[in-house]
Image (spheres, rainbow, N blue to C red):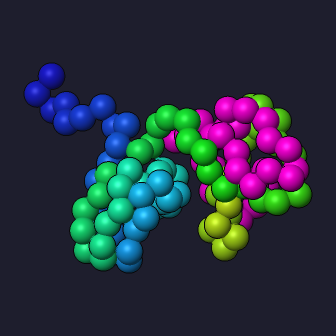
């Protein structure tokens, strides 16, 4: 197919500030994970598919399969759709005391 460019599991993004590899990245309405660090103005790949360990809201129990939303202000995932951005689904449950959760990214 002449117009096929790539699978779309990753997209290249230009860093608007210093980026840490493994950090959650909001690109428009997409939520992904930076695959490496980058300085301001550098291009870096963002993973849009896969399962990743990400920060979650404290005091929140999550069940496997729950829909997870990225809270930009708090810098973590929760189960509240309002004012947040859908990132995917919990690949495993997490206890309320846990600070991280496994997410399967979904665009």
In this view, 96 is above or below 65? below
Which sits in the foreground, 54 or 15? 54
Answer whether residue 17 is magenta in the image. no
**Residue 55's x, y, as percent?**
66, 56
Please identify the quarter of the rendering in which residue 85 is found: bottom right
Report whether 58 appears left or right of 12: right
Is 54 located above or below residue 74 in the figure?
A: above
Q: Residue at x 75, y 55 (%)?
A: 99
Q: Which residues are magenta?
A: 78-107
Q: Would you say residue 94 sits in the magenta stretch?
A: yes
In the rendered image, residue 47, in percent from the top left (x then y), is placed at: 41, 45
Q: Quadrant of the N terminus?
A: top left
> Most extreme residue toward the left, as rendered?
2
- Asked if residue 44 lies left or right of residue 60, the reply is left
| Residue 3 pos. (x, y %) | 15, 32
Nearest the viewer among 42 and 1 is 42
Above or below: residue 102 compared with residue 65 = below
């Amino acid at each position: 197919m002449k117009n096929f460019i790539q699978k779309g599991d990753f997209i290249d993004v230009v860093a608007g500030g210093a980026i840490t590899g493994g950090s959650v990245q909001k690109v428009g309405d997409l939520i992904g994970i930076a695959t490496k660090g980058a300085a301001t103005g550098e291009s870096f790949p963002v993973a849009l598919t896969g399962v990743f360990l990400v920060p979650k809201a404290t005091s929140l129990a999550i069940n496997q399969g729950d829909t997870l939303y990225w809270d930009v202000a708090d810098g973590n995932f929760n189960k509240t759709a309002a004012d947040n951005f859908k990132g995917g689904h919990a690949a495993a449950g997490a206890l309320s005391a846990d600070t991280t959760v496994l997410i399967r990214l979904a665009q």
